[in-house]
Image (cartoon, helix red, strand yellow):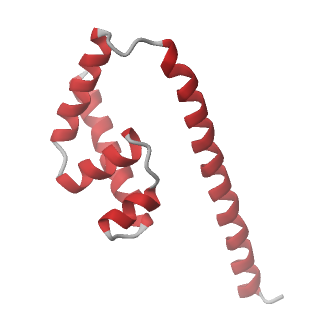
Amino acid sequence: MSDELMKEHCKKILRRIAWRLQYNSRKRHIRETTMIEPQFGEDTMGTVASQLYVQQLLSQLPEKARFIIKSTVIDGMTEEEVAKKLNITRQGVNKWKIKYLRLLAQKMTHSA
């Protein structure tokens, strides 16, 4: 097998492994959060304050970034679903998500 074919084969295998890791991580996160949510009351003041804080942070983002963050992080949509709605690539959604999650994290640490 030539070097180029070997590289492509290895890249394909690594992509598949990365996808499986991400998929299993997402499934585990969903399974764990659905077990935790019923244990805690939804009507507590802390929850309301947290929701208001999140809304305030999101309102500082551009509309497209707000939609991507809200859809993928809060509503649990996949990057692929959001990409189809916005007519952009999944990688584009991922880049926006990462960029603005980092920005939100910075804003949260500066305001704390």
- Which residue is pictured at 30% across the width and 12% down the height? 46
Tell whether 40 sits left or right of 1.
Answer: left
On-image quarter of the C terminus: top left
Tell whether 24 sits left or right of 29.
Answer: right
Of 52 and 4, nearer the camera is 52
Snapshot quadrant of residue 45 = top left
- Which residue is pictured at 21% across the width and 25% down the height? 52
Look at the picture and state if 17 lies above or below 100. Answer: below
Tell whether 82 sits left or right of 12.
Answer: left
- Which residue is pictured at 60% across the width and 33% down the height? 31
Q: Position of residue 3 (x, y in %)?
A: 76, 85
Of 80 and 11, nearer the camera is 80
Snapshot quadrant of residue 60 = top left
Tell whether 81 sits left or right of 66.
Answer: right
Count of numbered circles on the image:
0
Look at the picture and state if 77 lies above or below 92. Answer: above
Q: Position of residue 92 (x, y in %)?
A: 37, 65
Q: Position of residue 88 (x, y in %)?
A: 35, 70
Look at the picture and state if 71 lies above or below 91. Answer: above
- Which residue is pictured at 84% across the width and 88% down the height? 1
Q: Residue furthest bottom?
A: 2
Q: Residue furthest right?
A: 1
Of 109 and 60, nearer the camera is 60
